[in-house]
Amino acid sequence: MTPSFTFTPGDVVLVTGAGSGIGRATALHAAEVGLTVAAWDINAAGVADTVAEVERLGGTALAVTADVSVPEQIERGLAASRELGTIRHLVNNAGPSSAVDLDFDEAMLLSVGSMRRMVDAWLAPAPAGATLVNIASVAGNVIGTASDWYCAGKAAITGYTRHLAAYRSDEVRANAVAPGMTDTPRLTGFAASPVGQRALERIPLHRMATPDDIAWAVLFLLSPLASYINGVFLPVDGGWTVTQ
């Protein structure tokens, strides 16, 4: 049965990185609970597939091809997305993969900097009842990884979320979800590797997360059911970090 999160039917949610993985699952389930979806991704084919699936399920969605690190593309994307109605909710999910070798300063702009640009552009002006979820990670916030920029960037996303919750709560209710190991295209084959097997042994639930596991947590935090939850860092990791 589809859970009821008491969203206003037809309200618009903007999901970045909606072409695959966590973003795609969030877009699909958002439509399932009655939201209209502005699905953004740098991958035109991927986001078109997401929108086609939403429509196949009877929902309403718009595909936007945009690079969230480029201010002009953000503005164009918002203008198109606002044709759907007031954008009440934002899921800041897009960001570079930890497997990519990036210059540290460039990576900060691509990861946390892009989220800040999205928020500032979206909240100008802020819609009534605005909520957002930034996708962070257990990496950098609870554990360390080999990539310096990824750890630093994800920790910065959580810090930025706390800033929004503390100082911009008159505009938006902001929270962060921190996935653990999640079975997305970026981690294809990881669970079968020796490193992946060792990591799985330390997860009390003995499996990776699915994108759906993360998506439902995101939607709960966006929803009216979470109306007094502001500034949280929510690990969704099967208990992995409590064993570290």
Image (cartoon, rainbow, N blue to C red):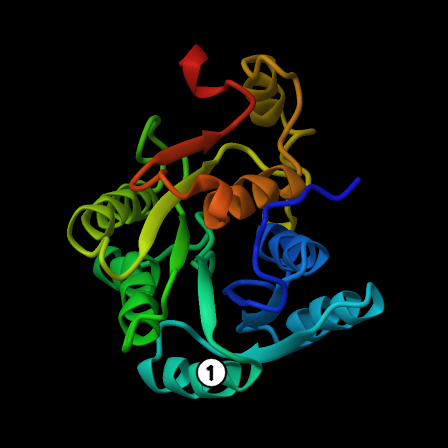
Image x and y of residue 52, in percent: 77, 72
Is 51 rendered above or below residue 226?
A: below
Q: At x 54% / y 13%, what residue is drawn?
A: 202
Looking at the image, residue 165 sits to the left or right of residue 127; the answer is: left
Instruction: Residue 170: name its quadrant.
Output: bottom left
Instruction: Residue 199: name its quadrant.
Output: top right
Q: Residues within 10 Å of mark 1 (few under 14, many from 20)?
A: many
Is 132 rendered above or below residue 53?
A: above
Residue matched to label 1? 77
**Which of the two residues, 200 or 230, is positioned nearer the viewer here?**
230
**Which of the two residues, 9 or 62, is positioned nearer the viewer here?**
9
Q: How many marks?
A: 1
Which quadrant holds the C terminus?
Answer: top left
Image x and y of residue 25, in percent: 66, 52
Residue type at mark 1: give it: Gly
Q: At x 80% / y 39%, what residue is drawn?
A: 1
Image x and y of residue 236, in percent: 51, 31
The answer to whether residue 242 of the structure is visible from this angle is yes
Image x and y of residue 6, in percent: 59, 49
Q: At x 53% / y 63%, what residue is drawn?
A: 17
Q: At x 44% / y 54%, what residue is drawn?
A: 100
Instruction: Residue 151: name its quadrant.
Output: top left
